[in-house]
């Protein structure tokens, strides 16, 4: 065996070990929370803690990466400090400079309003997602500059089929000839969601794409692009629906207007629900072990969780595809010239 | 109050179960039709499979709605209890 | 329930980061990538088309060659046929010529033979007539001597003639 091959196998072993460590630690965390609370293990709290946003990144139980807190309030102006200031050495919540962090909600001790723009766990994962995207796609762009007109190489050949699939199978048939304008948005959308979904499956990572704020922004983008690129046929279909009796039109108008809103809302809720529910299912099955206090159940739930995680990998891809697909369908409906 | 919350949690469970029935029927129908289509046109296997997975994912989201709503009511119930 | 209420801080950051990522990727990645893909696809299409064209040209050339070959073959066949005809004619001509010559020769020979025969016959006639005259003369002379002796004489002279 060559030295290179041995090195590669070592690398793989290290990655596998890390993944095992993370998975073990999430179980330990669940068990530890059970022991410390002393009043029985509460799966709801554990799951809630995982799927919600937090002001610190708790990789495993007790190991918290402090994140920057960014606050704005009338008397103090803009304030930036570490989230570790909210806890003393005994991991108890303490007030800092007149602010208090309680149940992931920051408030002023004196009750005045405060605006929280902190880099929370999910914001950190937005950054990580964005960084990975930039690294990957700049590498790909370099590849295209380097071997012009040649077969793709390395990471370029990994993502080229995906890019071509999105372009030829999703965007082109839905939007039609004028698809070039919307391709950058749709590709960014797809890869942002896909990478975010896959990142969320890493044990210890944040439930980023399963947060309604993130999906709301993505859906809002679709909403604005759809309505700003709406052609005459699109608006006339909403305000003066062709092919129906005139007296029906006033009744159809509100329905159509609601339809304009429900499209992005359905996108938002679909992604949020499928990712969040995936996490809930996995964590619930893990919780079974600690509810029943039995290693047999633990064995069984590990098997099921492994299977569910494999399905979640599929769901991560399908949801990204579905979001992109529906966005391009909506855009296609909007830019359609005539029926 | 405690009793009400217990009922709420129970209702959440029943609701999630009903949603699961609906989604199960939906996914079953999709799978059945896809199998039939594949048997009729084995050469279109890949395309049918992709479409089946996507539509199954869409139906599955409905079931997951049930899971999320159930979870929300469960947390609210246990918090109140 | 706060699971369903979007957090404004998160909304803000997501909006900012996503817009930045979208802008950067659209300008620096998607544009060159889609262009590179399009040029490569058109290049492949062009090369396929030119290959098709070359193949067609090749076929054309092949067909032309085939035709030329066919023509050549036909010409060769024609030439061969012509040559055979000519040769046959020459052969036939030669045959007829020789037969004519030989016929003429035979004819000449026949006429010569005829004339020789006639001459010979004439000579024989002359000889016979002279002989008969001689015989008659001698007979007449013997008769004048005796009869039996005449007979003897005739035979004797005939014997003499035979000896001649």
Image (tube, coloured by chain):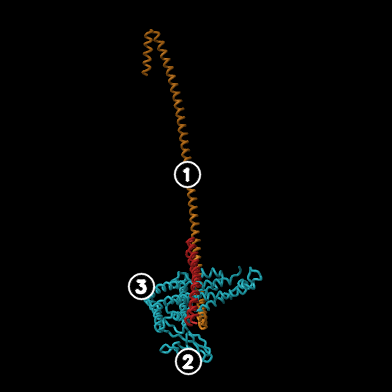
Chain colours: A cyan, B red, C orange
Q: Are marks 2 and 1 on the same chain?
A: no
Q: Nearer the viewer, residue A320 or C135?
A: A320
Which circle, 3 or 1, is nearer the viewer?
Answer: 3
Element assignment for label 3? helix
User: Which circle marks residue C83 in the picture?
Assistant: 1
Which circle, 2 or 3, is nearer the viewer?
Answer: 2
Q: Nearer the viewer, residue B27 or A171?
A: B27
Element assignment for label 1? helix
Q: Residues within 10 Å of mark 2 (few under 14, many from 20)?
A: few
Using the numbered discs, state the Cα–Cα distance from disc 2 to disc 3 in whole angstroms.
55 Å
Using the numbered discs, state the Cα–Cα distance from disc 2 to disc 1 in whole angstroms.
123 Å
Q: Nearer the viewer, residue B16 or C139?
A: B16
Residue C141 visible in the displayed image: yes
> What subunit carries mark 1?
C
Quarter of the figure with the N terminus of chain A: bottom left
Using the numbered discs, state the Cα–Cα distance from disc 3 to disc 1 in whole angstroms.
80 Å
N-term-proximal mark, 2 vs 3: 3
């Amino acid at each position: 065996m060559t030295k290179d091959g041995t090195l590669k196998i070592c690398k793989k072993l290290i990655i596998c070990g890390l993944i095992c460590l993370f998975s073990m630690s999430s179980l330990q965390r669940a068990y530890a929370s059970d022991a410390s609370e002393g009043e029985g293990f509460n799966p709801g709290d554990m799951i809630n803690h995982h799927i919600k946003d937090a002001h610190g990144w708790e990789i495993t139980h007790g190991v918290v990466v402090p994140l920057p807190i960014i606050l704005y309030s009338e008397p103090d102006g803009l304030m930036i400090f570490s989230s570790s200031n909210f806890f003393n050495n005994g991991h108890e919540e303490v007030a800092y400079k007149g602010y208090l962090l309680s149940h992931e909600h920051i408030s002023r001790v004196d009750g005045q309003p405060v605006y929280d723009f902190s880099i929370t766990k999910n914001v950190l994962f937005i950054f990580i997602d964005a960084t990975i995207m930039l690294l990957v796609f700049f590498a790909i762009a370099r590849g295209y500059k380097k071997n012009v007109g040649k077969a793709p190489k390395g990471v370029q050949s990994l993502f080229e089929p995906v890019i071509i699939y999105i372009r030829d199978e999703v965007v082109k048939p839905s939007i039609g000839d004028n698809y070039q304008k919307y391709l950058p948005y749709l590709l960014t959308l797809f890869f942002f969601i896909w990478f975010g979904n896959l990142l969320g499956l890493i044990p210890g990572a944040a439930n980023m794409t399963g947060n309604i704020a993130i999906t709301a922004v993505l859906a809002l983008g679709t909403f604005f692009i759809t309505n700003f690129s709406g052609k005459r046929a699109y608006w006339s279909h909403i305000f003066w629906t062709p092919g129906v009796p005139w007296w029906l039109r006033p009744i159809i108008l509100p329905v159509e207007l609601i339809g304009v809103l429900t499209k992005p809302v359905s996108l938002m809720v679909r992604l949020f629900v499928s990712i969040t529910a995936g996490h809930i299912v996995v964590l619930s099955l893990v919780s079974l072990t600690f509810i029943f206090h039995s290693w047999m159940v633990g064995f069984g739930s590990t098997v099921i969780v492994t299977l569910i995680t494999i399905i979640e990998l599929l769901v991560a891809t399908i949801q990204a595809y579905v979001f992109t697909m529906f966005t391009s369908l909506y855009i296609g409906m909007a830019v359609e010239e005539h029926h | 109050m405690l009793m009400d919350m217990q009922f709420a949690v129970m209702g959440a469970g029943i609701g999630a179960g009903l949603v699961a029935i609906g989604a199960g029927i939906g996914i079953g129908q999709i799978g059945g039709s896809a199998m039939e289509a594949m048997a009729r046109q084995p050469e279109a296997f890949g395309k049918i499979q992709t479409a089946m997975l996507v539509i199954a994912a869409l139906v599955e989201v409905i079931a997951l709605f049930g899971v999320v709503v159930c979870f929300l009511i469960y947390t609210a119930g246990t918090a109140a209890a | 329930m706060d699971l369903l209420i979007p957090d404004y801080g998160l909304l803000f950051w997501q909006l900012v980061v996503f817009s930045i990522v979208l802008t950067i990727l659209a300008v620096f990645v998607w544009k060159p990538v889609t262009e590179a893909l399009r040029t490569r696809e058109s290049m492949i299409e062009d090369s396929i088309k030119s290959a098709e064209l070359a193949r067609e040209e090749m076929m054309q050339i092949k067909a032309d060659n085939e035709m030329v070959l066919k023509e050549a073959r036909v010409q060769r066949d024609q030439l061969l046929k012509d040559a055979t005809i000519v040769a046959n004619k020459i052969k036939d001509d030669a045959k007829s010529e020789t037969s004519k010559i030989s016929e003429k020769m035979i004819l000449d020979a026949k006429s010569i033979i005829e004339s020789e025969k006639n001459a010979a016959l004439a000579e024989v006639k002359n000889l016979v007539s002279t002989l008969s005259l001689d015989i008659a003369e001698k007979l007449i002379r013997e008769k004048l001597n005796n009869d039996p002796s005449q007979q003897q004489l005739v035979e004797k002279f005939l014997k003499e003639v035979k000896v001649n």
